[in-house]
Amino acid sequence: MAKVATVTSKGQVTLPVSIRKRLGLRKGSRIVFLEGGDEVRVLREEDLERMFDVFEKRGRSLRLTRKRLGDLVKEAKARLWKERYARRR
């Protein structure tokens, strides 16, 4: 369901109560904004940390270095870009 909020002159937004409840946000909770294209996702900081922990553990089990993992991500992005945009020409 879509919720609407207004941005103040200071760039502040009040998250609707239903979203705060669903995410378990209280005074002092920390949130992360993830930008992607024309979208912004809001996550609880602890959820993002949990996701990174999963990647770290999986990387260790596969014996992947951060550099190798970064290289794999770059390769995947390039492949996806080609698949998505190369056909449009």
Image (cartoon, grey):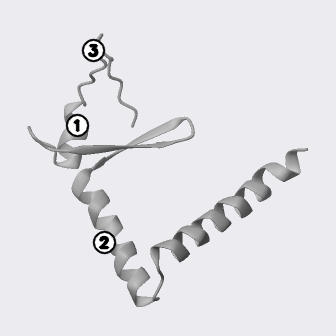
Q: Distance of mark 2 from mark 3, alpha carbons? A: 34 Å
Mark 1 or 3 closer to N-term?
3
Disc number placed over residue 53 in the picture, else none: 2
On the image, which quarter does residue 60 sit in? bottom left
Q: How far across and down, in percent of the image, does residue 69 sit?
A: 52, 73
Residue at 17 percent of width and 43 percent of height = 21
Name the amino acid, label 1.
Answer: Ser
Three-letter amino acid code at disc 2? Asp
Q: Residue furthest left?
A: 27
Residue under the point 33% across and 17% down = 7
Q: Which mark is residue 1?
A: none
Identify the element where label 3 is drawn: loop
Among numbered discs 2 and 1, the one appearing first in the sequence: 1
- The foreground one among 55 and 26 is 55
Compute the Cα span from label 1 to label 3.
23 Å
In the rendered structure, find residue 10 and report the number of the disc placed on it: 3
**Residue at point 14% right, 44% down?**
29
Question: In the rendered structure, which disc, 2 or 3, sits on the residue that comes first in sequence?
Answer: 3
